[in-house]
Amino acid sequence: MADSAQQQLLHLVLGGELTDLGGTKFKDLDKVEIVGVFPNYATAYGAWKAKAQQTVDNAHMRYFIVHLHRLLDPGQDAKPN
């Protein structure tokens, strides 16, 4: 049962076109893409990088990694391993 012993740190990857380069406000919320939810940062980073590279020609298109585990359990980072 290696999976049950491993801590699950959920990450969400999402993105879309921003209204301006200096902010994080999406131009059209109906067009925000949910890439997926991933079990750890490494796999989320891989998905984020792939999507970011696909949209490199559009400077206003941005993808983000959201640390869902921090939202679900805010004290988790303070807990000892």
Image: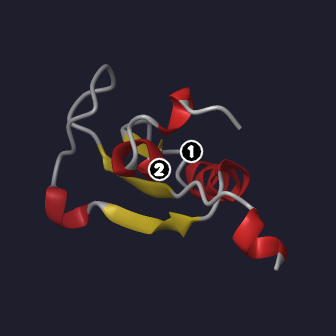
Question: Within 10 Å of the Cα at label 2, are there few (<14), some (14-19), or many (20+) other Cα atoms?
Answer: some
Task: Judge left or right: residue 47 versus residue 37.
Answer: right
Coordinates of residue 64 in the picture (x, y in percent): 45, 44
Task: Judge left or right: residue 48 versus residue 70.
Answer: right
> Which of 1/22 is in front?
1
Which numbered marker is on residue 39?
Answer: none
Amino acid of disc 2: His
**Residue 47 sits above or below residue 79 on the image:** below
Give me the residue at 75% from left, 65% from top: 5
Question: Within 10 Å of the Cα at label 1, are there few (<14), some (14-19), or many (20+) other Cα atoms?
Answer: few
Question: Which comes sooner in the sequence, label 1 or label 2?
Answer: 1
Give the structural element (helix, strand or loop) at label 1: loop
**Number of marks in picture:** 2
**Residue 58 sits above or below residue 80 on the image:** below
Which numbered marker is on residue 69?
Answer: 2
Coordinates of residue 48 in the picture (x, y in percent): 59, 52
Task: Judge left or right: residue 70 versus residue 48.
Answer: left
| Residue 18 location, quadrant | top left
Give the structural element (helix, strand or loop) at label 2: helix
Give me the residue at 57% from left, 33% from top: 79
| Residue 75 location, quadrant | top left
Q: Residue furthest right?
A: 2
Quadrant in which the N terminus is drawn = bottom right
Q: Which residue was labeled with disc 1?
A: 56
Amino acid of disc 1: Val
What's the image's color scheme?
secondary structure
Coordinates of residue 81 in the picture (x, y in percent): 71, 38
Give me the residue at 62% from left, 64% from top: 39
Give me the residue at 47% from left, 50% from top: 69
